[in-house]
Each structure stands twice: as C-alpha cells, then as structure tokens.
C-alpha cells in the first residue's frame, strides 16, 4: 500500500513565510514554491499507478519545477531526465546534476512554439524510448492548480480576508489554483497576473524569453481567473528583486521581484485593503546577474488602478 508520508520529507519547505511588507500588503516568501505541486502530482501519480517504484520521471523545465522534481526524485528512488534549453541557469544546472538528474539541452527552437515546443518534442521521444517512464506534465496536469488549495488555506489562516492577489505566471497552476480557492470565501477577489514581454500567455507575439513567460499556452492557464495582466521586462523584475532585498531583507529571484511592485505606503486605498503577493523562490542561481535600476512607475500606476477599482 502506498504510504503518503514517504513523499513528504520536504513538506516543511512547501509553506511560505508570510511577511507584512506594509500596512495591508503581505508577501508569501517560499523556499521553493514548486515543491508543493511537484510533491502533490507525484503522490497522485503513485496512487493512480502511473508512477512505479524506481521508474524514470521525464519532464521539460528550465527552472524551479526542475529543481523541485530533482529534490523529490533523489529522496524517493526515482531516476529523473530533464529536457531544457539555453535559458537554464548554469548554477541551477550544476545543482540538478548534483542531485542525480540527467539534463538534456535542445539546441534549436521548433518552428512553432519556440524552444518550449522543441523541448516537448524531445520529451515525447524519451517517453516512447524509456519503459515505465512517467511525465508529470505540469503544464496540463490538473493536480498542479489543485495543489495550491493548501496555500490558499494558509493565506486565509495567516492573513484573513484578501482583496487582491498578485503573482507571476508560468504554467498557470499557482495563481489560477490559489485564486480559485480563495474566491470560495472571497468572491470579489481581484487577481493580477504578471507576465514577460515576448510571452504568448496572454496574447502577445512569441519572442525571446528569459526567466519567466512561455512560448506556448499551457492548458492549466485559465484566463477567467485574471482581472488584470501586466508585463514586466527582465530589468524591471531584477530591480524589484533588488528592492525587496534592500528594503525587507528578502533575498528572492526575479520571478518574485516581478510580483512585488505594489504602491506601498501613503495611499489610503491600499491601506484599506489587504493584498497578497506570491514570491515563488529565493535568489539562489540568479544572484550573480546584474540588477539594473530601470524604473517601474508604469506597473505601479497600473496597480494603483487595481486598488481604485476595488
């Protein structure tokens, strides 16, 4: 019989610290947010007989999902093959190898869907070639957003009523899942997604990406959960991460920075509301990249409009 406890060696790392950044503005600072859906998806796969003992897990990722799967696979006796591309940070690459993962890098983008589609094409070949292999498919696996019910419960317990939720968007699992469950109690919740220029998630033309955003639209991304979308450049995301570190002692990565640009202090509208922002990972792996001081007034103005619309 499957023992659920065996998959929870890192459960303590799944829960974020809830940090009050200013009056009514809270940040959820994760060690590694993707541990939560990765663990839940693997548990469900074992329960359903899809993931056998000692099997090979195959996935496409260039970021935090890869690290979460590597941490869980080595703890629970699974082999792991990851398909990535040039965007994979070299420090993260070394960590993945140190955890025993095999990492394949695709060299050329697909004609449609760019590098992410090329990775999926290579992944399809591996799944056919490797017996008893399992694909978590975090872009389409319905257990990905379901996993965030736990996070929504924690926010309600620690913060109380939440008026606005802000988060960067990738697979769609985190903010879609969290907002879905928060709206059970708070149907007027205002959800704000943060994307990157060149990402196709919300209708832009596909372009060169780094850090966040995608060249494909995952089926876990449900546009109905979003009230506003904002696009931040890489420079803006790094600048915001720098501000979090300087002002609040939070050493976080640029995807966290992308979710952090809120009008703080001096605004009666903000002080009368409760905002939650999700910070998916620490700054390890991106700390050597330059932090620029590009202004972010456009995003702040947009979020002020969000507050005024409440």
Image (cartoon, grey):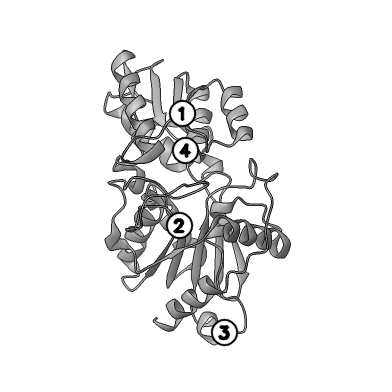
Coordinates of residue 157 in the picture (x, y in percent): 47, 61
Tag on residue 15? none
Q: Residues within 10 Å of mark 1 (few under 14, many from 20)?
A: few
Q: Residues within 10 Å of mark 2 (few under 14, many from 20)?
A: many
Could you say which quadrant of the image residue 175 lies in?
A: bottom left
Query: Of label 2 and label 3, which has the lower sequence position?
Result: 2
- Give the spatial CA distance, label 4 vs label 1: 21 Å
- Mark 3–mark 1 contact, CB under 8 Å? no
Task: Name the quarter where the N terminus is drawn.
Answer: top left
Tag on residue 267? 3
Coordinates of residue 138 in the picture (x, y in percent): 36, 39
Q: Which residue is mark 4?
A: 65
Could you say which quadrant of the image residue 268 lies in?
A: bottom right
Q: Which residue is mark 2?
A: 197
- Give the spatial CA distance, label 3 vs label 4: 37 Å
Q: Secondary structure at mark 2?
A: loop
Q: Nearer the viewer, mark 4 or mark 1?
A: 1
- Mark 4–mark 1 contact, CB under 8 Å? no
Q: Which residue is mark 1?
A: 107
Q: Secondary structure at mark 1?
A: loop
Q: Residues within 10 Å of mark 4 (few under 14, many from 20)?
A: many
- Give the spatial CA distance, label 3 vs label 1: 49 Å
Coordinates of residue 211 in the picture (x, y in percent): 52, 47
Q: Nearer the viewer, mark 3 or mark 1?
A: 1
| Residue at figure coordinates x 51%, y 40% from the top left | 64
Query: Of label 1 and label 2, which has the lower sequence position?
Result: 1
Task: Name the quarter where the C terminus is drawn.
Answer: bottom left
């Amino acid at each position: 019989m499957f023992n659920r406890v065996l998959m929870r060696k890192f459960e303590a790392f799944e829960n974020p610290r809830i940090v009050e950044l200013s009056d009514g503005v809270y940040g959820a600072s994760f060690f590694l947010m993707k541990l939560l859906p990765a663990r839940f998806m693997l548990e469900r796969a074992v329960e359903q007989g899809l993931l056998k003992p000692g099997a090979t897990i195959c996935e496409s990722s260039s970021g935090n999902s890869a690290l979460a799967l590597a941490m869980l696979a080595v703890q629970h006796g699974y082999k792991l093959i990851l398909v990535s591309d040039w965007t994979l940070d070299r420090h993260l690459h070394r960590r993945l190898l140190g955890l025993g993962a095999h990492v394949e890098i695709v060299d050329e983008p697909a004609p449609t869907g760019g590098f992410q589609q090329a990775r999926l094409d290579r992944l399809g070949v591996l799944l056919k070639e490797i017996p008893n292999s399992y694909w978590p498919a975090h872009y389409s696996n319905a257990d990905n957003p379901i996993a965030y019910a736990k996070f929504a419960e924690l926010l309600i317990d620690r913060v109380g009523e939440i008026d606005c939720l802000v988060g960067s968007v990738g697979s769609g699992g985190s903010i879609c899942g969290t907002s879905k469950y928060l709206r059970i109690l708070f149907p007027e919740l205002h959800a704000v997604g943060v994307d990157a220029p060149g990402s196709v998630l919300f209708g832009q033309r596909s372009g060169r990406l780094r850090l966040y955003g995608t060249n494909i639209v995952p089926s876990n991304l449900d546009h109905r959960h979003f009230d506003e979308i904002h696009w931040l450049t890489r420079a803006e995301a790094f600048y915001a991460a720098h501000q979090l570190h300087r002002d609040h002692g939070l050493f976080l990565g640029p995807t966290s920075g992308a979710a952090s640009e809120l009008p703080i202090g001096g605004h009666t509208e903000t002080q009368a509301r409760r905002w939650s922002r999700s910070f998916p990972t620490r700054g390890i792996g991106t700390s050597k990249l330059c932090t620029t001081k590009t202004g972010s007034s456009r995003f702040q103005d947009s979020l002020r409009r969000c507050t005024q619309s409440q």
